[in-house]
Amino acid sequence: MSRIVMKFGGTSVADLDRIRHVAQRVKAEVDAGHEVAVVVSAMSGVTNQLIGYVDSAGKLADLREYDVVVSSGEQVTSGLLAIVLQSIGVNARSWLGWQAPIRTDGSHGSARIREIEVEDLIRRFGEGQVAVFAGFQGIGPDGRISTLGRGGSDTSAVALAAALKADRCDIYTDVDGVYTTDPRIVTKARKLDKITYEEMLEMASQGAKVLQTRSVEMAMKHSVRVQVRSSFNDAEGTLVVDEDEIVEDALVSGIAYSRDEAKITLIRVPDRPGIAAGIFGPLADASINVDMIVQSYSADGNSTDMTFTVTKTDMDRAVSVLEELRDELKYDALTSDPNVVKVSVIGVGMRSHAGVAKKMFTTLADKGINLQVISTSEIKVSVLLAEEYAELALRSLHTAYGLDAA
């Protein structure tokens, strides 16, 4: 017997027919003798609809009331799934965030889980009961409903698996695993049997949409074995595990990309102590996250060009902040470009093998692709390219690193 947490996203519970299909998958695990907790998202599109209602009611809504409204989608799904499970002979009940309880901090709209009390839940496992949790929600220190931010149901599931000391947390979605790159662009992309937490974290943060970054961070912190599986077939998925579970580290495990990038360049900024703080401090104060940064010096050594990236949605705000500081920063000009893409080569094998970056740069140069910005970490090399070269870069790099399916 194993203890399993099963999480189903919005597309998996999009309507009653799909909820009935989910119920059959849950029943199969129960019939196999496992203790099962299920975490569900709101039906596909419902959360966006609820957010729309809040925005229409009042643009500067009280975030505590925002949480009350947007958390209701998961409440509906959990109740419906419990009803369907009962109708097919499975002892099940729904749980809302405050009922366990799932305790969070007080950051309404983007709360973080502090503790999950599972004693009652474990007792009910002993009675053969399936717990169906509303994902994405908890209870804050003020005793009010809190939500975990977009993608929070993945985080709910991993946190619950950690608290229950579950053998595995299965994340069911509309893809059947983690691929070496986006199979919609690279037809020779392969599904990975296993991937390390670190690689998955890099893949998620660099644009892969399979798992939310926060859920991977939590899985890594608590050593929760996560499996990404399809809701629509019975194929084995991809296990996200500790590096020790992987016999041999692949040089490169995957290639991620993000189109949600914009490039900003400040031209001829005076080269003096504190200039970087003068640029990036106000951006941080405006809650604008900066990613890649490159600095290039002028021939006279007295000035520098500062190039960095932000998300596309933050580009106009970032430009506005910096334009207001022009007299203080004394730069000559500011340019912005939303037509860029970030491509990242990822693999824990980079720690022990040289030449990964060289192969990336050579491959892209051979295709006539110019690199605008470069950044690296221990297991990742990222480059910024003109958006028009995104697909060519992905296909070329996928082949160059031997990732193509046979």
Image (cartoon, rainbow, N blue to C red):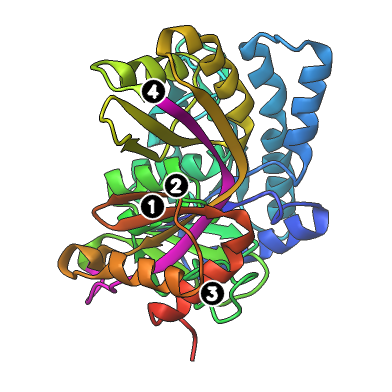
Asked whether the residues under the numbered discs 1 and 3 touch, taking CB atoms below 8 Å apart as contact, a structural biologist would say no
Asked whether the residues under the numbered discs 4 and 3 touch, taking CB atoms below 8 Å apart as contact, a structural biologist would say no
**Distance from Cα at disc 4 to Cα at disc 2:** 30 Å
Magenta stretch bounds: 245-268
Viewer-nearest of labels 4 and 3? 4
Asked whether the residues under the numbered discs 1 and 2 touch, taking CB atoms below 8 Å apart as contact, a structural biologist would say yes
Of helix, strand and loop, which one carries label 1?
Answer: helix
Residue hosting label 3: 395
Of helix, strand and loop, which one carries label 4?
Answer: strand
Q: Is residue 119 above or below residue 142?
A: below
The label shown at residue 202 is 1
Disc 3 residue crowd, few under 14, some 14–19, many 20+, Cα 10 Å:
many
Q: Is residue 353 above or below residue 55?
A: below
Residue hosting label 4: 269
Q: Is residue 350 above or below residue 283?
A: below
Residue hosting label 2: 205
- Give the residue type that dot 3 points to: Arg
**Distance from Cα at disc 1 to Cα at disc 3:** 19 Å
Disc 2 residue crowd, few under 14, some 14–19, many 20+, Cα 10 Å:
some
Residue 188: percent from left, percent from top: 55, 82
- Give the residue type that dot 2 points to: Ser
Rendering quarter of residue 232: bottom right
Furthest residue in direction front, as rendered? 300
**Distance from Cα at disc 4 to Cα at disc 3:** 37 Å
Residue at screen point 43% across, 40% down: 214
Q: Give the mark, 1 or 3, whose residue is nearer the N terminus.
A: 1
